[in-house]
Structures are given as structure tokens and as C-alpha cells.
Amino acid sequence: MSVGEEVRTEQDRPQQSLGTAAARNLATTTKSAPQMQEISSRWLLRTLPWVNVQGGTYRVNRRLTYAVGDGRVTFVKTGDRVEVIPDELRELPALRSFEDAEVLTELSRRCEQREFSPGDVIAEFGSQTDEVFLLAHGRVEKVGTGPYGDDAVLGVLADGAYFGEQALLDPEAIWEYTARAVTACTVLVLPRGHVEQVAERSESLGGHLQEQRAIPSQRTNKFGEKEIDLAAGHDGEPDIPHTFVDYEARPREYELSIAQTVLRIHSRVADLYNQPMNQTEQQIRLTVEALKERQEHELVNNRQFGLLHNCEYDQRIQPHDGVPSPDDLDELLSRRRGTKLLLAHPRAISAIGRELNKRGLVPETIEVAGNRIPTWRGVPIYPCNKIPVTEARTTSIIAMRTGEAEQGVIGLQQAGIPDEIEPSLSVRFMGINEQAIIKYLVTAYYSAAVLVPDALGVLENVEIGRWR
């Protein structure tokens, strides 16, 4: 290069061929369909048997049951002070149908707050039952005597449970087990003496308790259903018992719930931008995916028909050590015949795997629709990210027997609705407004029903953050 000759950079040189940026304007790119992170496996929707419901309502007829007091008690916490919501005292069997709000408020004020440390005995076997305990927070073991004189854990109680309720009706009642704190516990105590003092001044409470004591005990089976009188193993000509099967007078009815949204698409987009993918179809597809995610969330968490809120109290169990151990899974399965599936949050499944590894156990897996699903005792454990995880890193594990023929849990839908694209899911054209925007009404109808109480069980307060 001679002296004084300019150095020309590549940017200064004239373009000699078509650039890639301009070439892309004429090229047909390879592109994906619109992606969506919200889409999950939705195993609950895939495994739940769906029953077609005509008329939008499904009635569950059952045998007459006398069981009462099958709920949980709710509390209000202000600082370190815990109070029971007065109306929640009606969860106690003796106060089940009592409706005097002023008296319930007085009883809630007379509850005494007590704190117990791990290992403390709250109530001792054989002693007189003169107090009702409302467990606001913590875990309590019910300890009885085993067949060889050793201690045997009869069950575990957790937040919202109550025990000692027989003290309200029977002054001669004694404790049939020892209640022992497993963790630090906050308990509200309602002494029988305080209840009697209020009953002396309140005719409504005194009369109600007197009526409850006078009600004769009904002959029931172990499920609380009215006993069917039978004779077996007899000979000769004895009198054969007469009987009939009584039904619930007001059976529960499940109405189909609804999830809806209005999808809006500008006509210009729908007309011009449809190659290689139809914009309207893609918009509807993604909207339907979001609708199905919400549908599964409601089936798990809805307070009216959701699985977590429709499990009977005696089908809710607590883990003995907080973590989901094989023993807890066995207890969960033993509460019902023919458990078809378990549902757990993916993090809970990881915790189950850790506990199995600690014991040197390797869970078997089965293939379902091309996926390897872990099992316990042959029952598949499906992941469900709609089961909530609390700030304390606890969650629940759901066990179900499914199917109408098995008296299990079923999904409810109504096929054949107008503009249906899938059973019980429709996309209805709503017209075009003055801004040239096309509107579609996207609707899903659904619900779930538990045919008999033992078809659904829940292992509650499962700790998933303990690594040792």
C-alpha cells in the first residue's frame, strides 16, 4: 500500500450481493405454533371418568347416615392470641344444629388458650373427660395400649381438629386414649363447667343439650349408615327380622360449574394473517388450553365440589413424622378399597422418592400414554401442580377410587351443548362490533362428585422441604 492511500474498511465498500436481512423478507421461514408455558400434563382431567349429566344437575342418593360433626374448626389469630370463630363451634357433634349466635359467641369467649411442647401429655388415658380441646396449630398423637401392653399410635390430629367432645353430653365420660403433643401445639380448651354455667342462664343451650342427651343411639354400621337387620346361621323356625333400607331425605345435588371467557380477534388479523397458520384457530386453541387449566384447578380447589374440600373428616389423615413416608402412603391406601390413583404435587412426589430412598426402596413405574409414572403398591402417583403448596412448604396427597360402577369419584359434564368442539366445551360466535372485532364465547361446563365418602382420601400437611 503506497503512502497516502486511504484504508477502506468493509463498511465503506459498496455492497456486491443481496444481504441476508433483505433476503429473509422473500424467504419462507420455518416457524412453530404459538407456545404456552401454562400448559401442564392435566392428569386429573385425563384419568377422571366423565359422566354425562342431563339437565345440568347430578344427584347422589345414599343410605341414611347418622354421622355428624364431620368438619374442621376454624380459628382467627391476632398476634399470639388465637380465638375460635363462634359459628365454628357447631362442628362439635353436641352443637351441630344449635343456632343461637349470642350463646356461641359466649362459649367462644370462654375458651382458654394453652401451649404445649413436643412430648407433653394433653389428656391421659383413663382420666375423666371434662374438657373439650380445639387444636388450633400443631400435631397431636392419639396413643392407646397395644395388644402386648406397649404404646400404639391410634391416629394423628392436626390443625382444626377437636377431641374430648363427649364431655359436653356425658359427665361420666373418660379418656379412651392418651393425647400427646408431637410438635409445639396451640390448643383452645372449653371446660365442661363453663358450658354448664352458660346453659344455666341460656334456655336455648340448656334445652338443646337436654334434647341431645335424650336422643337414643341409633343402630348403625361402622360407616354410620342405618343398620339393616339380618339373621344368619339360625336353624328351626325362629322369627326372621324385618327390615328396610332407608335413604337420605335430602341427597346432595351437584350442579355443573362453569368457566368462560370472551375471545376477541380483529377481523383484519383473521382475514389477512392466516398463512401458514390460521390465527383464529391458534387463538382458540390457546384459550381452550387456559380454560382446561382453570377447570383442573377448580376440580381440586373449589370449595363447593373440589376434591380437597369434599373429603370427609374421617378420610383425612396426618403424616406421623411430617414427611410422606411409605407408612403414611400405606395408611392412605388402607382407608378404601380399590384405590385407582394418587395425585400429588411434583414436589411432593420428589419428597416421596427421598423417603423411599432412605429406606432403600425403589418404586415401580408403569407406562401411561408414553410416560413413566411412579407407583406405590401398584397404584400410580400422578403429578398435579394444582394441589397447593403453602408458605410453610406443606401440601396434600389425594387418593381416589374412581368410576360410577365402583362408587368412586366421577367427573360431571354435559355433552351435546350448542357449538361444541369437545364434550361440554363450546366456542360460540358472538358477532362483530363496530370496531371490526370478532368475538367468540368460550365456555366449559364441569363438576365432580364423590359417590360414597371413602372413595376420596387426603394425606394432609405433608412436609416437602425436609431434606434430612
Image (cartoon, rainbow, N blue to C red):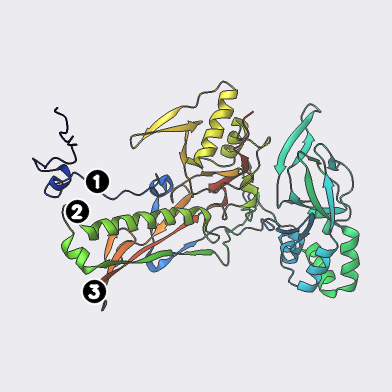
Residue 282, picture quadrant: bottom left
Question: Mark 3 highlights which residue?
Answer: 436
Image position of 255 (left or right of 30) = right
Residue of label 1: 32
Mark 1 and mark 3 in contact (Cβ < 8 Å)? Answer: no
User: Count of labels shown?
Assistant: 3
Q: Residue at x 38, y 55 (%)?
A: 290
Three-letter residue code for mark 1 = Ser
Secondary structure, mark 2, is: loop
Q: Pointer 1 and pointer 2: residues touching (CB < 8 Å)?
A: no
Q: Quadrant of the C terminus?
A: top right
Judged from this view, the residue extending furthest toward the front is: 3
Residue 47 vs residue 139, the one in the foreground: 139
> In x, y percent, where is residue 23?
13, 45
Residue ID at (36%, 62%) = 414
* Relative depth, front residue between 201 and 364: 364
Label 1: state its secondary structure: loop
What separation in Å lies between label 3 and label 1 (alpha carbons)? Answer: 28 Å
Quadrant where the N terminus is found in the figure = top left
Residue 325 rendering spot, x and y as whole percentages = 61, 32
Which element carries disc 3, helix, strand or loop?
loop
Name the amino acid, label 2: Met
- Which residue is labeled 2 in the image? 277
Residue type pointed to by label 3: Ala
Q: Is residue 108 left or right of residue 50?
A: right
Q: Position of residue 378 (x, y in %)?
A: 47, 31
* Label 1 neighbour load within 10 Å: few <14, some 14-19, many 20+: few
- Checking the image for residue 41, the label placed there is none
Q: Residues within 10 Å of mark 3 (few under 14, many from 20)?
A: few
Q: CA distance from mark 1 to mark 2?
A: 9 Å
